[in-house]
Amino acid sequence: FIRLMSQDRSALGLVKSIVSLSENMNIKIIAEGVERLEEAQMLSTLNCDLAQGYYFSRPVPEDQLLELLNRHNPV
């Protein structure tokens, strides 16, 4: 639904409903499959808690994960 939400009102409505439901139930959700800045921005506008996907990073081997996190979130 993430890929389609910028072009399909039904997909956007479903994403909005899921985010709203999670807020009403006081649970955190993760949007998966975020591949473009526009998708990340739309999810942020909708108050989606977390997102993951190729926009943020390609899959990383476990032994390189700590290095990646330190590079993007220096202490």
Image (cartoon, helix red, strand yellow):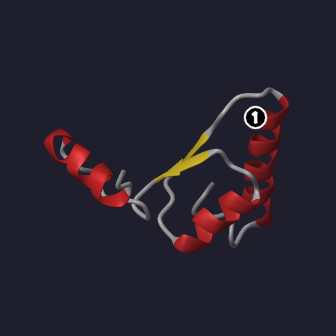
Tell me where residue 30 appears, x and y as whole percent: 57, 42
Residue pictured at 49% horizontal, 54% vertical: 33
Residue where numbered disc 1 is placed? 22
**Left or right of 21 on screen, residue 39:** left
Q: Residue furthest right?
A: 24
Specify the amino acid type for callout 1: Ser
Tell me where residue 19 appears, x and y as whole percent: 75, 44
Residue pictured at 85% horizontal, 32% vertical: 24
Above or below, 68 against 61 in this view is below
Q: Nearer the viewer, residue 13 or 26?
A: 26
Above or below, 20 against 55 in this view is above
**Left or right of 4 on screen, residue 45:** right
* Dot 1 alpha-carbon crowd within 10 angstroms: few under 14, some 14 to 19, many 20 or more: some
Q: Nearer the viewer, residue 35 or 68?
A: 68
Residue pictured at 29% horizontal, 52% vertical: 70
Q: Residue furthest front?
A: 75
Tell me where residue 54 appears, x and y as whole percent: 39, 60
Tell me where residue 60 appears, x and y as whole percent: 23, 50
